[in-house]
Image (cartoon, grey):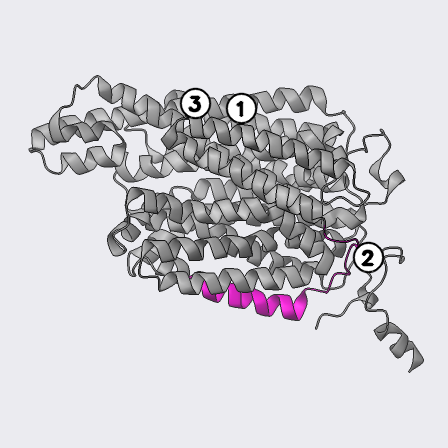
Amino acid sequence: MSGTASTRTTASPTPTDVPDTAGHPRRWAALLVLCSTLVAVTLDNSVLNTALPSLAKGLDASTADLQWITDAYTLVFAALLLLAGSLGARFGARRALLGGLALFGGGSAVAAVSTTAGELIAWRAVMGLGAAFVMPATLAIIIRMFPPVERAKAFAVWSASAGVGVLIGPVTGGALLMHFSWSSAFWINVPLVLAALVGVLRIVPTIPRQGTARLDLPAAVLSVIGLGILVDAIIEAPERGWTDAVTLVELVVFVVVAAAFVVWELRRDEPMVQVRLFANRGFVLAAGTLAITFFALFGTLFVLSQYFQLVHGYSTLKAGLGAMPFAAAMAAMSGLSPIVTARLGIRGTLTTGLGAIALGLGVMGLTTATDTPFVALAGEMMLVGAGMGMMMAPASMEITASVPARFSAMAGALNSVVRELGGVLGIAVVGTLVSSHYRSEMGDQHLTGPAAIAGHDLPSAHVVAGHLSPDAAGRLTSAADHAFTTAMNNGALVAAAVAALGVLLVGFGLPRRATRATTPAGKPAESVDAPAEPINAQAVQTV
């Protein structure tokens, strides 16, 4: 009886408690639940992209409205990631996860019944706030549930779910929009979130809070302002121009705010972000490879979806299925990444993965034409997806291994920030390159009058062609499709060059035998403060 009582009274172990090196007994079931929350959050944006044409009609939304319906989520999500990770560490990762899911699901339900574009933009921002709490919390819980020997496998599953959620979205959106209105793109989140909430409550253990220091409010404010300004500058730059005065002012303000953030954090004994980690080559290079991966993923998907739907004339469902080679290869290689990492080491795995991405994108950029068969593109996409799946887990492992146990939530937030910024930058840079090259190519057509709008972008060209005679429409769409395909190839080659640069940086910068990052002092992280240990199964309650 006394033994039972003793077990129940240890519900809040201190960070110095001896961990259960076997990990939590329900850790694998809990991992599946955590992955389902991640899929729900990452699925949302890619489903929405498919629904944008329906939204334009249903809410009479302008192009600017559609952009903000997409960007409101991204802006709030990225800006609040560091603050959300800090609050999760303070109040408990499981509470942060539950609260984030409730916000995300509730925001989705209200967004589905919005009657104006303004309402939808506001509720998309609420969804972004919820997602900002979900992403860091899942990683923080995984780090604490699993012993070091199993973490690589757990990270592989987690990384696969993050990527697959993005890639299956277009298929889900295409299938829904064949039978339902645009609101189905938001209603689909509600049952997913409800199932995830039940799973978290029943299976995921309570994680002891990782710190009792006061909330670093100045750092929180600076991080929100800085990340918000940076993301807004990146999102708006393709439309305003990278050299536009507003864009340049925002970038300068970001640099000033970031400098103030660094100075403030360096003076703190318990900072919200350990900025000294950025002097650690392993940490910086691992974060850089994640940014490059999502730069290539989001940038490529952004243009491929238009290529499939407009150049090849696929339906929304068929175009969504076109992304499945990415997902299949990524999921398969994510499962094998622990084996590959054990053989090649982190440096070898990251360089091989980045090399596969560069090769796949390079071949795509050099060989794709308006009539390229899907099977050829599928092979190139599978190569890119395999490279991504191979490296996401070891890169995340390298990031979290750099961080002491009490900062695992911070590591999760930084991991998510890097992914998000890489993706946003990929869409902005590749999108800008494709748009500028398309307009340059179409300028040679000397379009005048109402037809001149066809020179702005590919969708406009196909709309204009619908009002012309068959011969004129054929000539216009042929020229537009060729211009877009050439522009897309240039974008793919730029993404390939970025991945190739990553190969060089990791190959020459990351130590050969590095399997986890070191502290700025050059000592292994565990010699200063042991990496996150798994939680003791007897010291948690799964209420």
First along the sequence among labels 1 and 2: 2
Hey, which quadrant is residue 459 in on the image? top left
| Residue hosting label 1 | 498
Number of the front mark, 1 or 3: 3
The residue located at (29%, 40%) in the rendering is: 309
Q: CA distance from mark 3 to mark 2?
A: 55 Å
Q: Is residue 159 left or right of residue 454?
A: right
- As for residue 454 lying within the magenta part, the answer is no
Work out whether 149 lies above or below 111.
Answer: above
Q: Which residue of the protein is positioned furthest toward the bottom in this rendering?
A: 1
Q: Examine the rendering and report whether any part of residue 382 can be seen.
A: no
Q: Bounds of the magenta span?
A: 188-215
Q: Earlier in the sequence, mark 1 or mark 3?
A: 3
Distance, label 1 to label 3, CA atoms, is: 21 Å
Q: Nearer the viewer, mark 3 or mark 2?
A: 3
Q: Earlier along the polypeptide chain: callout 3 or callout 2?
A: 2
Q: Position of residue 390 (x, y in %)?
A: 61, 37
